[in-house]
């Protein structure tokens, strides 16, 4: 589990909410239909979250593969605003935090992206050591 720092008190006290919304970010841009609900109360590793992620990415890559010159995938992230500080700090909604390695592992994300970009013939140029 990642150690998350609260942007208000600067303590390692940030926790993800049990339910919320995740935004998919590809090449530093929000996907138009890139919001996924998560619910950790159902299961620790919510299988519907992973399934929804694959479906949204497949839909996007299918559209992107039809472009004349599709740009390669250079960056990817999953962000959420559904976090709270255990010290009850008031966190502004403009703060977004990555949920990779909280809701889904980096290895799973990499596997999904490699599978889908290969299937839709889109270049994947992410430096995984920086993730």
Image (spheres, helix red, strand yellow):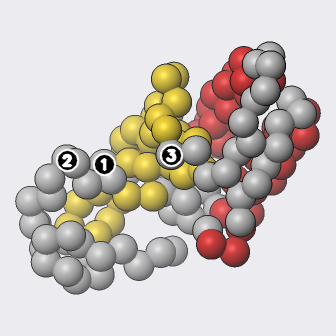
Horizontally, residue 115 falls left or right of residue 17, namely right
Q: Residue at x 74, y 42 (%)?
A: 72
Residue 82 in percent (x, y) is at: 31, 49
- Calculate the distance from the C-alpha at mark 1 to the C-alpha at mark 3: 17 Å
Q: Secondary structure at mark 1?
A: loop
Q: Residue at x 58, y 44 (%)?
A: 27
Residue situated furthest front in the rendering:
69
Q: Secondary structure at mark 3?
A: loop
Q: Secondary structure at mark 2?
A: loop
**Are circles 1 and 2 on residues that touch, CB within 8 Å?**
yes
- Calculate the distance from the C-alpha at mark 3 to the C-alpha at mark 2: 19 Å
* Among numbered discs 3 and 2, the one appearing first in the sequence: 3
Point out which mark residue 28 bears: 3
Question: Is 18 in front, or is 125?
Answer: 125
Question: Is 15 in front, or is 25?
Answer: 25
Residue 59 in percent (x, y) is at: 70, 21
* Among numbered discs 1 and 2, the one appearing first in the sequence: 1
Quarter of the image with the C terminus is bottom right
Label 1 neighbourhood size at 10 Å, few (<14), some (14-19), many (20+)? many
Q: Give the number of the mark in front: 3 or 2.
A: 3
- What residue is disc 1 on? 81
Residue 17 in percent (x, y) is at: 33, 53
Q: How many marks?
A: 3
* Among numbered discs 1 and 3, the one appearing first in the sequence: 3
- Calculate the distance from the C-alpha at mark 1 to the C-alpha at mark 2: 6 Å
Residue situated furthest bottom in the rendering:
11
Label 3 neighbourhood size at 10 Å, few (<14), some (14-19), many (20+)? few
In this picture, is 110 found above or below 4?
above
Residue 61 in percent (x, y) is at: 74, 28
Question: Is 30 in front, or is 87?
Answer: 30
């Amino acid at each position: 589990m990642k150690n998350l720092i609260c942007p208000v008190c600067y303590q390692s006290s940030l926790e993800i909410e049990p339910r919320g919304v995740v935004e998919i970010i590809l090449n530093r841009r929000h996907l138009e239909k890139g919001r996924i609900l998560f619910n950790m109360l159902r299961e620790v590793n919510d299988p519907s979250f992973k399934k929804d992620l694959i479906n949204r990415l497949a839909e996007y890559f299918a559209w992107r593969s039809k472009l004349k010159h599709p740009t390669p995938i250079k960056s990817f992230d999953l962000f959420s605003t559904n976090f709270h500080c255990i010290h009850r700090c008031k966190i502004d909604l403009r703060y977004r935090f990555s949920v990779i390695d909280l809701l889904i592992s980096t290895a799973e994300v990499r596997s999904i992206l490699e599978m889908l970009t290969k299937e839709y013939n889109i270049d994947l140029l992410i430096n995984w050591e920086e993730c």
